[in-house]
């Protein structure tokens, strides 16, 4: 599946879930979608930034993200910030135009 920034923009502020085999899941909120594409580039660059209220960060890796109105999508997440409020993650995409 090819991802686009436009696909995620309507879902900023909504929740995504990462299910784990033991019946537990981690809830992430999509905080923003940053489009970094330039007209001269042959690629579409964008990133998704998520936050969670978990006190422990997941290791970077591919996770199946579920959303109420999107199909389950496997996305490579990288933790980039940890505060007293939780952990933030980023997913960065480079897709040929």
Image (spheres, rainbow, N blue to C red):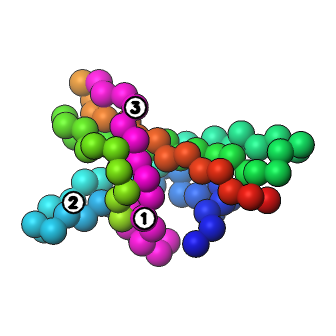
**Magenta span covers which residues?**
65-83
Residue 6: mark: none
Examine the rendered structure and indicate whether residue 31 appears above or below residue 4: above
| Residue 90 at least partly seen | yes
Magenta span: predominant SS is strand
- Front in this rendered view, residue 51 or 22: 22
- Front in this rendered view, residue 38 or 32: 38
Could you say whether the residue bearing mark 3 is in a helix, strand or loop?
A: strand
User: Mark 1 touching mark 3, by CB under 8 A?
Assistant: no
Could you say whether the residue bearing mark 1 is in a helix, strand or loop?
A: strand
85 falls in the magenta region: no
Q: Residue at 66% of width from left, 60% of height from top?
A: 4
Q: Residue lying farthest top?
A: 84
Residue 25: mark: 2
Instruction: Point out the tag, 2 or 1, that comes first from the N-terminus.
Output: 2
Q: Mark 2 against mark 3, which lies toward the viewer?
A: 3
């Amino acid at each position: 599946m090819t991802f686009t920034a436009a696909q995620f923009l309507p879902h900023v502020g909504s929740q995504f879930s990462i299910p784990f085999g033991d019946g537990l899941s981690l809830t992430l909120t999509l905080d923003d979608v940053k489009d970094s594409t330039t007209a001269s580039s042959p690629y579409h660059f964008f990133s998704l930034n998520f936050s969670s209220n978990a006190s422990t960060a997941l290791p970077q890796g591919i996770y199946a993200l579920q959303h109420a109105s999107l199909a389950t999508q496997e996305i490579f997440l990288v933790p980039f910030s940890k505060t007293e409020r939780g952990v933030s993650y980023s997913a960065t995409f480079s897709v040929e135009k």
